[in-house]
Image (cartoon, rainbow, N blue to C red):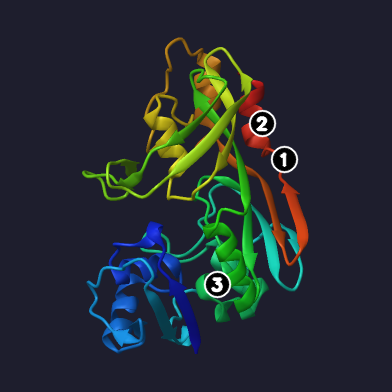
C-alpha cells in the first residue's frame, strides 16, 4: 500500500482533484484516481471529496493506493543509459524517440518498462520514481528516485525550483542575446494534445541566452524555472523562434533564406532539436552536477549550419 501526502500551494490551487493527482502519478490514470476518490482513498483535510472538487491553497491531500492493481506497465529489456546511481537516485541519459511512460498512444517499450526490468522495486514508488519528464523526441538527462523518501524530497526540490536544468535548443532565426519569457501556459483551445501561451494558464518561466549564432538559426542555452509540459517548445514558438524540427509547434521547413543543406539536415534529424544537457542540485548536503554531450545526430545538424 502506497500512502502519499500533498499540500496545495498557489501554483496548484483551483485544479480538479482528479486531474491534479493523475498529473502527479504517472502510474495512475485519471480513471483510476476517480475510482480511488469514490472509494474514499483520497482525503482532503481529512474528509472525503467528490471527483470535481477544486483544490484550495493550504489543502492537505492524502491518497492511498495499491500499485499491484496496476499491471499495465510490464518489465521489458530496453537499453537505458544509466550515467549515475546510488541508493537514492538514478540519472538516465534518455535518447530521442524513447517515450517516458506508457499511455494511450504507446502501451509499452517505454523508459518505465526498461526501468522496471532493471530495477523491479521501482514499482513500489509513486510514478515509478520519475521526478520530471522529457518529451519523447527530446534527449538528455533525467532524475529517477529509488526510494519513497528520495521521491518525496527530489519532487520537493523540483517544485521549489532548486534543481537547475539546462537545455540546448536549436531555433529558427536569431533572438536577442538573452531574455526571460514569463508567460502562462495552458491547453490549446483547438487541439488538446498541444499547449499555448494562454491567459489564466499555469505560470511558466523560461530563461535563455544565445550559445552560438548561425546565418538562419541560433543555438540557445535554455534554463527552466518552472516545468510545464512542452514549455520550451511553446515559449520559443510564442516569441517567433520555434524549435527547429518540431513537428507540432513549427511546421516551417524553409525559414526565410534557409539553404537546401540546412533543410535536408533538419529532415534527416527527424525530431525537435532539443537536448537536456545539464542537471545541478544539492541532495542530502551533497552537490550533484551532470553533463550530457550533444547527441551525434544533433551535433551533425549543428555542424552543417
Q: Is residue 271 visible?
A: no
In this rendering, the answer to whether 198 lies above or below 251 is below
Which residue is tagged 1? 293
Q: Quadrant of the C terminus?
A: top right
Q: Nearer the viewer, mark 2 or mark 3?
A: 3
Q: Are marks 1 and 3 in contact (CB under 8 Å)?
A: no
Circle 3 is placed at which residue position? 128
Q: Residue at x 71, y 45 (%)?
A: 292
Label 2 and label 3: CA atoms lie apart by 32 Å
Relative horizontal placement of residue 253, taking residue 218 as reference (left or right): left
N-terminal of the pair, mark 2 or mark 1, is 1
Question: Does residue 19 sit above or below 172 in this rendering?
Answer: below
To which quarter of the image does residue 85 belong?
bottom right
Label 1 SS: loop
- Name the secondary structure under disc 3: helix
Residue at 60%, 73% (x, y): give it: 116
Q: Which residue is mark 2?
A: 299
* Camera-side mark, 2 or 1: 1
Q: Residue lying furthest front in this view?
A: 58
Helix, strand or loop at label 2? It is helix
Q: Residues within 10 Å of mark 3 (few under 14, many from 20)?
A: many
Position of residue 197 relative to residue 268, above or below, is below
The answer to which of marks 2 and 3 sits earlier in the sequence is 3
Q: Residue at x 50, y 85 (%)?
A: 2
Circle 2 residues within 10 Å: few <14, some 14–19, many ≥20: few
Mark 2 and mark 1 in contact? Answer it, CB < 8 Å.
yes
Q: Position of residue 175 (x, y in %)?
A: 50, 20
Amino acid at each position: 500500500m502506497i500512502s502519499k501526502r500533498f499540500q496545495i500551494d498557489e501554483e496548484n490551487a483551483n485544479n480538479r482533484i482528479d486531474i491534479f493527482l493523475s498529473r502527479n502519478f504517472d502510474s495512475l490514470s485519471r480513471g483510476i484516481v476517480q475510482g480511488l476518490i469514490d472509494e474514499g482513498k483520497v482525503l482532503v483535510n481529512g474528509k472525503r471529496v467528490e471527483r470535481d472538487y477544486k483544490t484550495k491553497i493550504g489543502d492537505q491531500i492524502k491518497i492511498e493506493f495499491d500499485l499491484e492493481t496496476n499491471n499495465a506497465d510490464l518489465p521489458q529489456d530496453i537499453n537505458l543509459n544509466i550515467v549515475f546511481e546510488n541508493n537514492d537516485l538514478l540519472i538516465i541519459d534518455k535518447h530521442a524517440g524513447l517515450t517516458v511512460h506508457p499511455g494511450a498512444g504507446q502501451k509499452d517499450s517505454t523508459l518505465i518498462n526498461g526501468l522496471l526490468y532493471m530495477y523491479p522495486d521501482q514499482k513500489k514508488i509513486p510514478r515509478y520514481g520519475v521526478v520530471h519528464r522529457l518529451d519523447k523526441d527530446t534527449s538528455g538527462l533525467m532524475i529517477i528516485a529509488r526510494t519513497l523518501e528520495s521521491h518525496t524530497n527530489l519532487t520537493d526540490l523540483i517544485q521549489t525550483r532548486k534543481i537547475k536544468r539546462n537545455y540546448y535548443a536549436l531555433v529558427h532565426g536569431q533572438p536577442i542575446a538573452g531574455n526571460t519569457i514569463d508567460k502562462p501556459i495552458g491547453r490549446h483551445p483547438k487541439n488538446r494534445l498541444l499547449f499555448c501561451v494562454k491567459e489564466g494558464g499555469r505560470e511558466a518561466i523560461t530563461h535563455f541566452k544565445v550559445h552560438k549564432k548561425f546565418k538562419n538559426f541560433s543555438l540557445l542555452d535554455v534554463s527552466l524555472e518552472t516545468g510545464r509540459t512542452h514549455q520550451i517548445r511553446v515559449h520559443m514558438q510564442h516569441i517567433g523562434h520555434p524549435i527547429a524540427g518540431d513537428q507540432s509547434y513549427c511546421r516551417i521547413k524553409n525559414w526565410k533564406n534557409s539553404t537546401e543543406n540546412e533543410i535536408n539536415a533538419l529532415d534527416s534529424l527527424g525530431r525537435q532539436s532539443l537536448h537536456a544537457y545539464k542537471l545541478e542540485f544539492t541532495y542530502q548536503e551533497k552537490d550533484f552536477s551532470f553533463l550530457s554531450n550533444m547527441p551525434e545526430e544533433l551535433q551533425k545538424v549543428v555542424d552543417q549550419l
